[in-house]
Image (cartoon, rainbow, N blue to C red):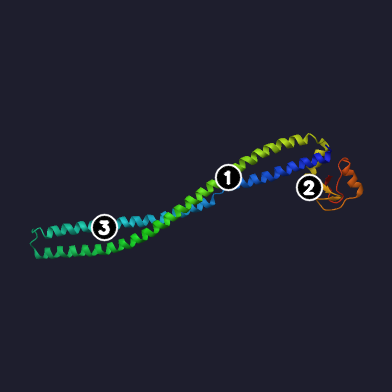
Amino acid sequence: MAQAQALYALQEIDLKIIAQNKRLETLTQQLQDNQSVLEAQQQVEAAQKRLTPLHTKQKDLELEIQTNRQKAKASEDRLYSGNVKNPKEMQDLQQEIASLKQRNQTLEDQLLDLMLTIEAAEADLQTAERHLAAVTAQWQAEHTDLLSEKAAIETELEQLAAQREKAVTQISAQNRKIYDTMKKKKANRPVSLMQGRMCTACGVEQTMAIEQAVSHNADLVYCENCGRILVK
């Protein structure tokens, strides 16, 4: 194989390696990015945070209502036991019972309003949890696909590395040095195909002498405009 053609084959391998390494970097970033799941988790935590004090308040109201009922019952039992003879004491018991029942009516109204608020908050929490489950499932599916693609690219990179090692053996040490030097200056494309007499890298038509030199596989021939190695 002519040296220019061998260099072009090496360039094709190198371009594939560069492209796959870029894709591998992107995949790695995507695998580390679970922002959508984190945001969904934050929504669930926020809904739970809103619900917790409501449940605490519910328990407090229920406890106070139950305590007042027990007090009222105890007072009624005492009032109607026949043991209380003092009119003033009987009146005080009656007022206490009425006050406790009135207080409980207010508390029960508050409890009813609170239960409606809790119901709405629980619905919000369920919505947030369903969203989290959906986002997590989607992320896991994408995660699996990304991992599979990552593994395939890593395998391909190993194969490309082997191909490159073989390709390099067909190039002289001097021409490898030229290739490596030009590669840095020519955006990883130091070799350019010719179409007719035109360099496809810069679009400039070459002289007849250059075209003939490239066609006859002479030692490295360069584009008179961009300086790249020409090959057909």
Q: Percent x, y for residue 86?
A: 8, 63
Q: Gap between marks 2 and 3, in whole Å?
A: 82 Å
Q: Secondary structure at mark 3?
A: helix
Q: Can you tell which of label 2 and label 1 is closer to the viewer?
A: 1
- Residue flagged by tag 2: what amino acid is it? Lys
Query: At numbered mark 2, what does the secondary structure look like: helix, strand or loop?
Result: helix
Q: Which residue is mark 1?
A: 145
As drawn, is 167 to the left or to the right of 23? Answer: right
**Which residue is pictured at 67% across the width and 44% down the height?**
21
Position of residue 186 in the picture relative to residue 72 (left or right) = right
Percent coordinates x, y for residue 213 in the rendering: 90, 43
Q: As displayed, is residue 151 above or below residue 43?
A: above
Residue 28, image x, y percentages: 60, 45
Q: CA distance from mark 2 to mark 1?
A: 37 Å
Q: Label 3: which residue?
A: 64
Q: Residue furthest right?
A: 209
Q: Secondary structure at mark 1?
A: helix
**Dot 2 corresponds to which residue?**
185
Left or right, 163 with reference to 198: left
Q: Earlier in the sequence, mark 3 or mark 1?
A: 3
Q: Nearer the viewer, mark 3 or mark 1?
A: 1
